[in-house]
Image: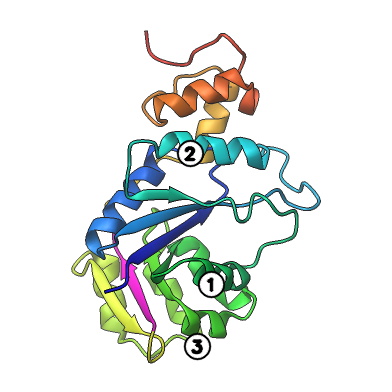
Amino acid sequence: MSMRIGILGGTFNPIHLGHIHIANQTQKLLPLDQVLFLPSGDPPHKSAESLAPAHHRLEMVRLAIEGHDQFLLSDQETGSRKKSYTIDTMQNLMQALQGELWFMVGLDAFQDIASWKSAVKLLSLTNFVVLSRPGHSFLKLLSIPFLPPIARSQWHALETGDMDRLDVPTSATTTLVILRLPPCHISASAIREKIGQGQDVSDWLPPTVESYIIQHHLFGAKKGESSSKT
């Protein structure tokens, strides 16, 4: 039987305990044998001033997943300055990895999948796991024109919490799994803001990641200053 591998992409700017929690939860619920963390590269034109350089974000992920044998790290996108499209990434990973791949994405991002490059082909190429996000409604997915027909009652059941999982075949070989997870209210943007203000973020970050941020002056952190509680 081939391994089931989750692909968790993102800027990880920075990676935080919420990401680790989501990866753990999804791994158990599907279940998955491994989760591959895939930090994005630097934008070609540096559109996000608050985005830490790719090599720093890659190293923070490496530190965060140390000790988690089921978690892996990929530098596929951080090593390129070209714009990364999900379909290109997944095609490359399918060639490099031996296993059944599951692309993990938040509900907020997936509701815009119609604007992704080759979206219809992508859904027939790989399995998807759509993860609930606080403040975002499952009913938004009703507007995606190329999803298989799904009863409105099932969407409402997800919305109300009467259902925690919905499996939808998207081709003869691929499946879309929609998971309702316990809400995680940690956000990278809030972490960056607190770090810049010198506030405590020790409850939101792995200790090794917090130390790395301080050591390398990321997000306005000052060297020698710890935001940990005293």
- The label on residue 212 is none
Q: Is 138 left, or right, of 219 in this rendering? A: left
177 in magenta? yes
| Residue 212 vertical position relative to residue 50 in the rendered view, above or below | above
Q: Decide if residue 158 is on the left or right side of residue 99.
A: left
Q: Amino acid at mark 2?
A: Arg
In this rendering, does residue 183 appear at all? no
Out of 189 and 177, give the one closest to the viewer.
177
Q: Which residue is mark 3?
A: 146
Image point (62%, 14%), residue name: 222
Q: Disc 1 marks which residue?
A: 95
Q: Which amino acid does the dot numbered 1 rest on?
A: Gln
In this rendering, does residue 24 appear at all? yes
Vertical order, 70 against 169 (above or below)? above
Q: CA distance from mark 1 to mark 2?
A: 23 Å
**Secondary structure beneath label 1:** helix
CB contact under 8 Å: marks 2 and 3: no
Q: Going 36% across and 27% down the picture, which residue do you hit?
A: 203
Of circles 1 and 2, the one toward us is 1
Rounded to the nearest angstrom, the CA distance separating label 1 from label 3 is 26 Å
Q: Nearer the viewer, mark 1 or mark 3?
A: 1
Q: Earlier in the sequence, mark 2 or mark 3?
A: 2
| Residue marked by disc 2 | 62
Three-letter code, disc 3: Phe
**45 lies left or right of 64:** right
Which residues are the magenta region?
174-181
